[in-house]
Amino acid sequence: MATALSRQVWGLGFLKRQRMDRFYPHRQRHFFFSFLLLGLCLVGLALLHVWLRLQVVDLGYVLSTTSKLHNQLEQENRELKVELATLTSPDRLEAMARTRLGLVEPQKGQVVLLP
């Protein structure tokens, strides 16, 4: 008896569904379009995720290149500071003034102090 009742109930539910589909045919289209829209949203989200990951990788490469360039420029700046300090040292300037320009220390009477 319980089996017969369950078959009847199951059959009634199936019949009700068939009747509802007959009276509401747009309902099937609605579900189809809902699932289609959901699928498109998921595909869109997946593509957005992949695009963002590619942007992160690309920016990582740019950052790495920029960091290497920054380090090279800092090294070049240090070398140029050392070269500037060497070229402007008083001993070197005095030696160049004596050899290239022929300058000598002034004699005692050559210096005139102005008031």
Image (spheres, rainbow, N blue to C red):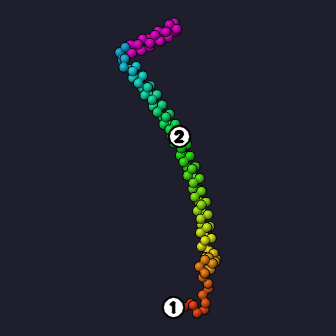
**Amino acid under disc 2:** Leu
Q: Position of residue 104 (x, y in %)?
A: 61, 84
Is disc 1 placed on a helix, strand or loop? loop
Q: Position of residue 42 (x, y in %)?
A: 48, 31
Residue at numbered disc 2: 54
Can the viewer see residue 90 in this picture? no
Q: Nearer the viewer, residue 96 or 93?
A: 96
Kindly identify the residue that appears in the image at 53 percent across and 40 percent down.
Answer: 54
**Amino acid under disc 1:** Leu
Asked if the stretch drawn in magenta spans residue 5, the answer is yes
Q: Earlier in the sequence, mark 2 or mark 1?
A: 2
* Range drawn in magenta: 1-21
Residue at numbered disc 1: 114
Is disc 2 placed on a helix, strand or loop? helix
Kindly identify the residue that appears in the image at 62 percent across and 74 percent down.
Answer: 89
Q: Position of residue 49 (x, y in %)?
A: 51, 37
Kindly identify the residue that appears in the image at 59 percent across and 60 percent down.
Answer: 76
